[in-house]
Amino acid sequence: MNYQWFVGIDVSKSTLDITILKGSEISNYFQIGNTEKEIKYLLRKLAVQEKINLKETVFCLEHTGIYNAHFLKIMEEKTLLVCLESSVHIKQSGGLQRGKNDKIDSYRIALYAFKNKEFLKLWQPERLAIRDLRRLCTLRERLLNARKQLKNSIKEDLKFLSNPAVTQITKCCKQTLTALDADIKKTDEEIKALIESDERLSELFSYIESVPGVGKVTAAEIIINTNEFKR
């Protein structure tokens, strides 16, 4: 692909810092809110005011989990070219660097895309089944952490409080722990049902779980983080 423009995006919860390169030269810089409305407005601005051919542009950003959601959704809708890279990879490729803020980081991301244009691996949207699997696995992890934190706090109380006090605390928390156990079980059932309902997922889980010592949790993480081995 003969890219003409390289857009580096530094993503945070509230804002997107964006540096635009034409070749290796800085064309412009913007900061916008991390919302679908502002991202769509920016794309119109790039096309109309900046005269950028969006189909000859590669947009590069780091993995930041859920904070990427709005941007990737719009990119998918517009069928634009996106490179999603790890922050470690981008940092290592830049060598010794001085200074750091969101504006500088967006420039470094754009420069990374320019320097590696021949080797960029373009992002491929996940299937709906993978998105559902990611959502359920994230929920399961949160529920497990909540249960662990509550149980650990009760164990700590045992070391310093009298038995009657600990008994009262345990009694108060019993319903919460029971509810968490039920929610974890329900989430596991939904994950199982999702896998069984999707032929490709079922096949991949079967392959991965055939490795001794590898269970569904590890298999799910592998499938999610490789986008079904496409990455």
Image (cartoon, rainbow, N blue to C red):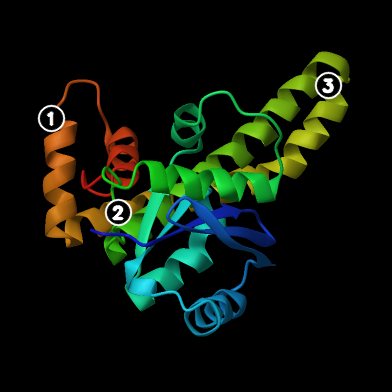
Q: Residue at x 17, y 34 (%)?
A: 208
- Determine whether 222 is above or below 187 in the image: above
Depth order, front residue of 154/135: 135
Q: Position of residue 130 (x, y in %)?
A: 30, 57
Q: Position of residue 36 (x, y in %)?
A: 56, 76
Three-letter amino acid code of the residue under disc 2: Leu
Q: Which mark is residue 161?
A: none
Q: Give the structural element (helix, strand or loop) at label 3.
A: helix
Q: Residues within 10 Å of mark 2 (few under 14, many from 20)?
A: some
Three-letter amino acid code of the residue under disc 1: Ser
Q: Disc 3 marks which residue?
A: 163
Separation of marks 3 and 2 at Cα, in angstroms? 59 Å
Horizontal placement of 175 versus 221: left or right?
right
Q: Position of residue 59 (x, y in %)?
A: 43, 59
Q: Which mark is residue 210?
A: 1
Three-letter amino acid code of the residue under disc 3: Asn
Q: Disc 2 marks which residue?
A: 122
Comes first in the chain, label 1 or label 2: 2
Comes first in the chain, label 1 or label 3: 3
In which quadrant of the rendered view does residue 4 lie?
bottom left
Separation of marks 1 and 2 at Cα, in angstroms? 30 Å
Can the viewer see residue 190? no
Comes first in the chain, label 3 or label 2: 2
Q: Residues within 10 Å of mark 1 (few under 14, many from 20)?
A: few
Q: Residues within 10 Å of mark 3 (few under 14, many from 20)?
A: few
Confirm or deny contact between disc 1 and disc 2 (CB under 8 A): no
